[in-house]
Image (cartoon, helix red, strand yellow):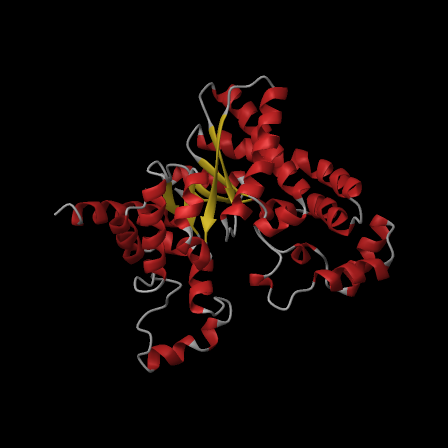
Amino acid sequence: RANADTPKDAITASNFGAEGIGLCRTEHMFFGADRVFHMRKMILSDSLEAREAALEELLPYQRQDFYEIFMSMKGLNVTIRLLDPPLHEFLPQEEEKILELSKAMKVSVEKIKERIDYLHEFNPMMGHRGCRLDVSYPEIGRMQTRAIIEAAIKAQKDLGKKITAEIMIPLTLDVREFKFVKAIIEEEANKVIAENKADLDYEVGTMVEIPRAALLSSEIAPEAKFYSFGTNDLTQMTYGFSRDDAGKFLPDYYATKIFEQDPFAHVDEKGVGRLIKIAVEEGRATNKDLHLGVCGEHGGDPFSIDFFHRVGLDYVSCSPFRVPIARLAAAQAAIKNKK
């Protein structure tokens, strides 16, 4: 499979031979000039009604993007991840942009700055993001679910073939958290299906990118239809350092032979790999039908693909341009491990 954030990415992935989309990151759809304004309105709203009104304006954009991705993949699996980054990423930081937003929204500069300060985090990677957003703001999850299901219903009708919409919850760390967000998704999805008198299948799964989720796989698996290992964050969380900052000191680790290779390029079998193995074994022990994949950068690395094959993952997902390499590496791993 391939990672694709836009309909254009999906077409590229399909042309390179991807057998589906393993990760569609919905947040990238919000950064368009015509959309980010509505996103900012939602973030700056101080009531549920105002947030829902802003989300209602975003709904058509999300629905159309998802529809085009479903159509591009012609019925192949598409896994759509709910909003992941912290909300402050959508707000302007430059004085000029803040002033522009203030005028457009008829909101004082002071109020916008207060909201920016409130949302500021000292460690955003481990902050208010992923499914934590849906716990705090269930209306975001409801809007995204509605957009996905409405798009899938229309695409299924226009393609004339069955579609299964795969909705992925990011950054899960506890089964109660997963069940809380899953309930939001299921309630809205079933409501949309009933409204449209449609026959549509959908599945709810999670990304496994926090060590705690991997270690508690036996509890989460019975509630999930699938896992996708987000190895970028799982590596960061396991090692305790940021991928964005590690480049400053990792060369010293290579020079002193502490590390022999970049753990963000080749999966660390002893540490991160062990967590994946635990999650796979305990997950399948409690849910034999659990579908397993990986969607981090390691999904396009031949060394890592061989490991994923050995631990029993069903698929890898990588950037569209790495699909040919990933397909070749997956075939080589299958032949090698048959011997």
Looking at the rendered structure, the number of numbered marks drawn on it comes to 0
Q: Nearer the viewer, residue 42 or 326?
A: 42
Q: Residue at x 31, y 54 (%)?
A: 277
In this view, the residue farthest toward the left is: 339
Where's residue 259, x and y in %?
Answer: 33, 74
Give me the residue at 34% from left, 77% from top.
254
Q: Is 89 placed above or below 319 here?
A: below
Q: Nearer the viewer, residue 217 or 330?
A: 217
Residue 74 lies, with reference to residue 143, above or below; the image says above
Q: Position of residue 272 (x, y in %)?
A: 36, 61
Quadrant in the rendering for residue 139:
top right
Residue 303 location (% of width, % of height): 28, 58
Lateral position of residue 280 relative to residue 190, left or right:
left
- Can residue 31 be seen by looking at this rendering? no
Residue at the image point whose x is 43% and y is 59% from the top:
211
**174 above or below 272?**
above
Task: List x then y, in percent, for residue 253.
Answer: 37, 78
